[in-house]
Image (cartoon, coloured by chain):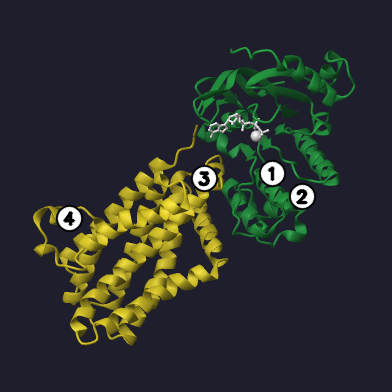
Amino acid sequence: MSLRITLRTTGRVLNQIRHDPRTIALILLVPSLLLVLLRYIFDSQPAIFDRIGLMMLGIFPFISMFLVTSIAMLRERTTGTLERMLTTPLHKLDLLLGYGIAFAVLAALQATVATSVAYHLLDLDTEGSLGTVMGIAIGDAVLGSAVGLFTSAFATSEFQAVQFMPVVVAPQILLCGLIWPREEMIGWLQAASDVLPLTYAVDALLEVSAHTDATDQMWRDVAIVVGATVVALLLGAATLRRRSG
Amino acid sequence: MANAIQVDDLVVHRGGKPVLRGISCAVASGTVTGLLGPSGSGKTTLMRAIVGVQKVRSGQVTVLGLPAGSPRLRRRIGYLTQDPSIYADLTVRENARYFASLYGTGRRAADQAVVDVGLGDAAKQLVSTLSGGQHARASLACALLAEPDLLVLDEPTVGQDPVLRHDLWQQFHALAATGTTLLVSSHVMDEASRCDRLLLLRDGGLLADDTPDELRRKTDTNDLEESFLRLILALRDQPVEVA
Ligand SMILES: Nc1ncnc2c1ncn2[C@@H]1O[C@H](COP(=O)(O)OP(=O)(O)OP(=O)(O)O)[C@@H](O)[C@H]1O
Ligand SMILES: [Mg+2]
């Protein structure tokens, strides 16, 4: 491991994205546009927007960073750059953390735009602070990146990688409490929801929604999200094989 | 002279079929060794085994005194893959500087390597917009700037014009003169004649391990291309012996 190589890798990934302005625009603007859409869908029910809109602030970064990372990693595999990297002094964790930090930076920008739009233009209302919501959103993005890094190992084409999104992401969205409260789901679905990391990401945001100050439960949720990220990164490292057939 | 590469009875299977059938050879330090053979004979596979990215079935590969693939070798080996493997969405210079940072060789070495492969004018161009030969050279620059003890180059001059090929081979020999060992695969016979020693593969077996002069003498011809044809055709209708 080397901090220098990790940061250079972050710089390299950010450079690649910098050369792709359309992707940047999509990442930064789409969440805000969807929030506007939600705001007017629930025009007569601002309390529902306060709940759903807030949850979406945690779900967007998870989805977009999951997709961007799994495609980026798949490209590294299919173009041979990954194999070449692994013959250099680069450590596997340098690569994974390099990606993680780069997408955290991107997620911070995305979260800044989306939360600003939600709070200032769309009147989203929470007890807790905007800063805490942004912090949690960035954590969700890094989780999405880590999960994307890991699942990309199981895809051999872009088609497959994109199809992992409904497989890996959709169940988490359905079960995290966004469309129906978790407490009212039948037992085995609650159990499934309990082991999915996005559940805790969303729960942390709901804590911010209801309480002015950080609660113990919020910290527990954040700790679980961080723990799941570390596990996904380690699993991802295990899928980076130096030797192949 | 010590051997930079020592291969003992190496067997590699790919896709369930034997691709290297018990190869033994050695590459002396500070030399330029050519790796030749028909398409599909196993050149790339042997190089992959040497840089430590190929699963091997049996046998030993020792590189710079260490088992191939040892972590300590990673800063001592430069590897050029046959298909250019650099980032298409970065410029030539950004690629070179990133690779330089991995090897800790710095920006100046990166920029110099780009100039050395004749891409000084295209340094700020995105790799995805380069011509085929330029793309291959950009990838080569990233291998050269490793300043390694061993350079493994898989068809480094394919798609290049004669003047560039000449320049690149001068660089290879200049590197060898400073003690770097080079293993270079090629299909071009005038390049074979520039090597200190030649390894000729056929169907995963080692057909010859000689200097260019020895090869010419053994096959009774002054033309290396003719030597290879004779060596390979002489065996074409015979079954390949499995080691
Ligand atoms: N991933 C793979 N799976 C199965 N077989 C493979 C794989 N890669 C290579 N082979 C086979 O292994 C053999 C040797 O391939 P290799 O790439 O080493 O040849 P080569 O000498 O480098 O050829 P060329 O001059 O065309 O580059 C070929 O028959 C090839 O079809
Ligand atoms: Mg080859």
Q: CA distance from mark 3 to mark 4?
A: 36 Å
Asked whether the residues under marks 2 and 4 belong to the same chain, the reply is no
Q: CA distance from mark 2 to mark 3?
A: 24 Å
Graded by Cα atoms within 10 Å as few (under 14), some (14 to 19) or many (20 or more), the crowding at tag 4 reads some
Inspect the image, locate mark 1, and give the three-letter code of the amino acid beneath it. Leu
Inspect the image, locate mark 2, and give the three-letter code of the amino acid beneath it. Asp
Graded by Cα atoms within 10 Å as few (under 14), some (14 to 19) or many (20 or more), the crowding at tag 3 reads many
Q: Which residue carries the number 2 mark?
A: B116
The number of numbered discs placed on residues in the rendered structure image is: 4
Inspect the image, locate mark 3, and give the three-letter code of the amino acid beneath it. Leu
Asked whether the residues under marks 3 and 4 belong to the same chain, the reply is yes
Q: Which residue carries the number 1 mark?
A: B144
Please identify which colour was used for chain B in the image: green
As helix, strand or loop, the secondary structure at mark 2 comes to helix
Asked whether the residues under marks 3 and 1 belong to the same chain, the reply is no
**Residue A222 in the image: above or below residue A160:** below
Closer to the N terminus: mark 3 or mark 4? 3
As helix, strand or loop, the secondary structure at mark 4 comes to helix
**Residue B43 in the image: above or below residue A81:** above
Q: Which residue carries the number 4 mark?
A: A194
